Image (tube, rainbow, N blue to C red):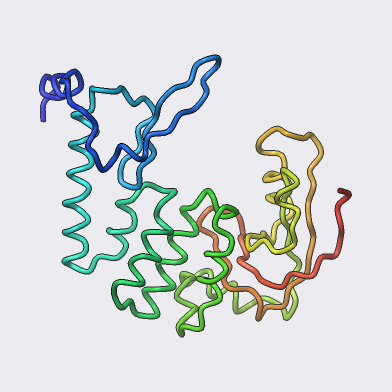
Amino acid sequence: MNVSDMMEMMERDEALHQDLVPWIDTRRVGKHLMKYLNAPLVQEMFYREGKCAVINARYEQKKKLLEHYLAEGNTMGYIFAHERPYRLNAFTELLARRSISDAHYWQTVSAIWTDSENIWQNHSQWRRLWQSTRGEKHEAMDERERAAYKALPEYVTVYRGISNSRQRRQGGLAWTMYRPKAEWFSLRYGFKTIPDVLEGRVSKDNIHAILFGRNEQEAVCRRVVLINKLPK
């Protein structure tokens, strides 16, 4: 498609596809309420009512892509064709529809986890996935991560940066073995100037995986025993 065709589509009068209408939401920008589209296959922050040809074309293209990925058994392609907030749900729905090998299960769980930015919103779902009794759990890690996991002591000190009161619960899955990274997480939104960091100890057997994909020395853990307790 050339530039003139794209410009024509952008200005063409066309209603939003009926599948996408339920996914329209509003957000406040200054004193104004702005509409935006937050659908599983298409997101558009600058949604213009009645000028939806480009959005509709993207949606139809994504639907065809999903059909293609399903037909060829491309699990990763199917999941990552969804917008980021919906990839975890796409995976759980796919698990209910078709058989996935143990190795592929853990590779996919790890890939979605590393890509996610809303772990806390799906805590129960993530906990169920990580606590699966499927075999080959080492496939959640790459070769370097598996070597590092193998070298861990029986008990490991881990840290969790707290940026708001919601994150104070001990049951969080995401921890780091590098305290400065936990401090960074605590301060990254600018809500505070002094970091709040939970420090805990966890047995190696209760570490689902260690992941280096985001340069966080991340440890996905259960049953972390707190060493320190932050003031409320």
Q: Residue 82: give x, y in percent of width and height.
A: 33, 51
Relative side of 16 to 185, left or right: left
Towards the viewer: 1 or 66 = 66
Residue sticking out furthest to the top? 31
Q: Residue 101: give x, y in percent of width and height.
A: 34, 80
Q: How many marks?
A: 0
Towards the viewer: 71 or 21 = 21
Towards the viewer: 47 or 18 = 18
Quadrant in the rendering for residue 198: bottom right
Q: Residue at x 37, y 47 (%)?
A: 83
Relative side of 158 to 99, left or right: right
Quadrant in the rendering for residue 10: top left
* Above or below, comparing residue 68 to residue 1 in the picture: below
Position of the N terminus, as image quadrant, is top left
Q: Residue 117: give x, y in percent of width and height.
A: 52, 48
Q: Residue at x 78, y 51 (%)?
A: 197
* Above or below, comparing residue 229 to residue 153 in the picture: above
Quadrant in the rendering for residue 18: top left
* Above or below, comparing residue 11 to residue 111 in the picture: above
Q: Residue 35: give x, y in percent of width and height.
A: 40, 26
Relative side of 161 to 219, left or right: right
Q: Residue at x 50, y 71 (%)?
A: 129
* Above or below, comparing residue 9 to residue 98 in the picture: above
Relative side of 160 to 114, left or right: right
